[in-house]
Image (cartoon, rainbow, N blue to C red):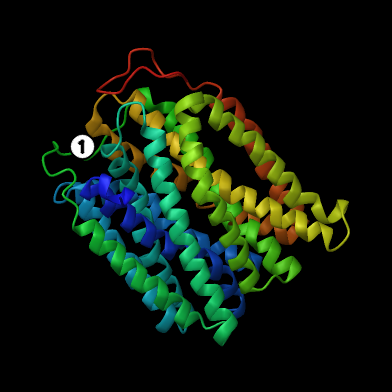
Amino acid sequence: MNPLRKLSPDFRRVLAATLFFGAVAGVFASTLNNYLSEVHGFDAGHRGWLELPRELPGFIIFFVVAVLLTRLRESRIAALAMVFTAAGALGLGYLSSGMTTLVLFIVVWSLGDHIIFAVEGPLGLKLAKAGGEGRRLGQLGGARNLGTILGVGAVWLLAKAVGDRYDLFFLVGTVCAAVAGWFYFRLDLGKTDPPSRRFIYRREYHLFYAISALFGIRKQIFLVFGSWVLVSLHGVPVATIALLYFVASALGVVLRPLLGDVIDWLGERRVLATDEVMLLVVCLVYAFASDLLRAPYDLWLLYGAYILDHILFALRVARTTYLKKIAVDPADITPTISLGITIDHAVAMTLPILSGWIWERYGHEWVFVLAGAIAVAGFFVCLRIRVPETIHSDTPTSRA
């Protein structure tokens, strides 16, 4: 019997939507830095400055989602997000001849990207059994990684067949986003749920806000400058970046569900604190691999750090499971996740500009020394996480 038949229709639809959105993410992650460098002539400074408009939607997402929640449930918001993502990808592929249009379509794509980040966690939690939140979100993470493999694989095959045709790369992303939007639109999930709150800020969630800010800093440094080390310092081509992302995603298909189980088993405090320790190791590799090893061994070590860093991103779902366990009201979850995204972008929007300046002035090593210091601070913040013995709402007692 087909195991998918045992799943609820909504879970199958969410899995399919997540898979196709993962393909979009794979296309962008494996091509964007090369696209900016080769087509638009960006250097590290320009790349850092681009993060300001690119992350602007993340900064305002709390207000965007609050407005959308007055009209739409989370599944329809997810479908709308895919419309923005598809429009942004299509514009980058065919309409971005100058800096103004480039920034415009980067912002449109980013708006869709950030909206989906705000609602995908709550959608997954609605499909989870009590005490199995990490497992369910891990399964969806595995589906996203499988989609990423398909997206990266398409980029790799196209690059080998016709060269670096960024118009075709982004067309693949457009089609995948449209398919994901169709699956999200067909969801019945949440029809009978009470509406989520529009705006929420509670002192009880202060650690969630702090962890969100730390994650924003980590995300910006590594998404922007981790791959930039490979592209600008070592001349790694788009096909190799796509292959690395393919390997990381293939490992993620297996590891993400397992890491979800680990979150349920060990608890968010141990998992997130361990993540910060591993992040420190990755920082040191990015900073000093070429000083410690000769070519090509330094590049191999950097490849390993790149793959490990992407695998560690799977642990971000621990923030979402932690929030559910401490939520005063289930209706707080979506707007609180949105506020967390806004907070992490308030901190992180200007950091790439500072990091780009540090890179140009002092060298790339100091960018990752800064990231390592932030990882150490994050370790001590995560040690403060506690999940109460009596969980609010309908969640079970869980260990931290």
Query: Looking at the picture, does residue 235 appear above or below residue 143?
Result: below
Is 131 left, or right, of 351 in this rendering? left
Residue 246, quarter of the rendered image: bottom right
Q: Nearer the viewer, residue 101 or 395?
A: 395
Element carrying mark 1: loop
Give the quadrant of residue 245: bottom right
Picture coordinates of residue 218, whole percent (x, y): 57, 45
Q: Residues within 10 Å of mark 1 (few under 14, many from 20)?
A: some
Q: Residue at x 29, y 67 (%)?
A: 179
From the top left corner, tell me how far across and down residue 338 is, in percent. 34, 43
At 34% across and 60% down in the image, what residue appears?
Answer: 112
Q: Residue furthest top?
A: 389
Residue 31 rendering spot, x and y as whole percentages: 54, 71
Whether residue 115 is visible, yes or no, is no
Q: How many marks?
A: 1
In the figure, 321 relative to 312: above or below?
above
Q: Residue at x 86, y 63 (%)?
A: 295
Q: Which residue is mark 1?
A: 197
Could you tell me which residue is drawn at 25 percent across and 23 percent down? 394
Q: Is residue 263 above or below residue 118?
A: above
Q: Residue furthest bottom?
A: 162
For the residue pair 136 and 390, the one nearer the viewer reads as: 136
Q: Is residue 159 left or right of residue 339?
A: right
Three-letter amino acid code at the position of disc 1: Arg
